Amino acid sequence: MSFAEYVTLLQRRWRIWVGMVLVGLLAAGGYNVLADKRYTAVATSFVTVTETGTAGPSGIFQGSQFAVQRMSSYSALSSSPQVLDPVIDKFALDVPLRRMREMVDVSSPADSVLLEVSVMDSEPQRAAALADETSRQLGVLIEQLETPRGRAASLVRVTLTQPADVPVAVSSPRIWLNLLLGLVGGAAAGLVLALLRHHLDRRLKTAEDVRAIAKVAPLGSTLYSRSAKRQPLVALDHRSAAAERYRSIRTALRLADVDRELRHLVVSSPMAGDGKTSVASNLAVSWAQIGVRVCLVDAGLRRPMVPQFFGLDGTAGLSDVLVGDVELDDVLTPWNGGELTILPAGSLPPDPAALLDSSAMKHLVAELRGRFDIVIYDSEPMVAVNDAAVLARQVDGLVLVVRAGSTTRDQLATCLDLVGEARLTLLGTVQSGVRLDRRARSSYYAPDGGWGRPELSERSDATTRATTDRSGAVAVDESAPTS
């Protein structure tokens, strides 16, 4: 991934990494509050060599070099029981030797003869006293070890030159360092989680996601609306942003195949609930609004949804015509004063795919082609059954509806494989239920669906309700998933 792709990923997954940063900061803050406060006291001792066997400046130099070379060894002696046990006994500390070793640290600056003994403790006064006593005990042990056999005096003298001051500032926890570590750790964890979510999340969310699978850009997209189940026919309000989306899809379909005139198309989707019936219905309304003779055919012979969108009685329809029980003219239903003609699904047959592949269906397709300028078939989902593929072979092409944030890459890829295997003409894809952020909604269209001023939006809403009431459309049952 390039740097720009990482930036785009962080923008899309900002909730994840911002949440992890907050978690990291809260964890660091919690540790700072709950951790025991500790203070560090430092005592400094000076090491000298009292006898080297050489007089004069050269003897002093040799003695200092001897002491410098020994400093690392002297520092290591600080963890010995001979040093720490007397300290524990003197202060009656209820700590094991191992814990005492963790409290004490001895270091020596480079090229110096100084021993710095630091002790960390929860009480500042006791920390200073422990540092002084540890320095004295370390000096005693060093002088004992540097006393040759047969001699009473040591060659090395350790002098406590700077007793420890009582510390004022807390040395642990290190508040700002912990917060910085929490920030960096949270940001790193957020980035990892965002990457994992990006690679594991198979849902199609943007037009680029659809383009990457289908290899072509979507014909357009429809907007997500909370009121879609109550007012599914959003194309009725021709001044709304939602209706404009369908007009754009309509235009894109007219240009989808420049070599021939597009008249018959099947609208399907990978799975149920992707919004195919909404797209087919509103696209039919959008085409009818420009004076084109349009017929919307409910070819969902397993679970018909079109009658619910338009408030029609779908007792008799397509399946009844195909089996010869009724005449076509008896079930073709004019809607909204004849602006649009609808052919309901009718009775549910035992084998819908066989019925759609029958010679009667081919004759019906030809009959509808002669009567109408545009015929839109709302068919069943492609992943579940092959009804759409069977029907699409008889018409000009297929439109696939994918739902933003719901349809997965694998589902769309399966549909495209079916299209290739059946040698169907794919006119394009439509991405349904696209959500706009607040800034896009406020700059693009008013929250209630109208363009421009609030009063214009209110009039548009009233127009939609009036048109819907005149046409007889009813709200879709909210308990049922939208097709």
Image: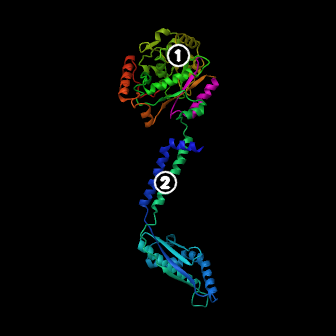
Image x and y of residue 56, in percent: 62, 89
Q: Residue type at mark 1?
A: Val
Image x and y of residue 124, in percent: 42, 71
Quarter of the figure with the N terminus? top right
The colour mode here is rainbow
> What residue is pinned by disc 2?
183
Instruction: Tell me: 16 left or right of 212.
Output: left
Q: Residue type at mark 2?
A: Leu
Marks 2 and 1, how far apart at CA: 59 Å
Number of marks in picture: 2
Quarter of image, res 230: top left
For the residues labelled 2 and 1, say whether their Cβ atoms are less than 8 Å apart: no
Between disc 2 and disc 1, the foreground one is 2
Is disc 2 placed on a helix, strand or loop? helix
Mark before the other along the chain sequence, 2 or 1: 2
379 relative to 65, above or below? above
Front position in the image: 377 or 213: 213
> What residue is pinned by disc 1?
375
Residue 93 visible from this viewpoint:
no
Magenta region includes residue 397: yes
Task: Say few, some or many: other residues with alpha carbon within 10 Å of mark 2 (under 14 / 14 to 19 / 20 or more).
Answer: many
Image x and y of residue 353, in percent: 56, 20
Instruction: Tell me: 148 left or right of 328.
Output: right
Residue 184 visible from this viewpoint:
yes
Magenta region includes residue 402: yes
Range shown magenta: 394-422
437 relative to 189, above or below? above
Image x and y of residue 278, in percent: 47, 24
426 relative to 204, above or below? above
Quarter of image, res 79: bottom right
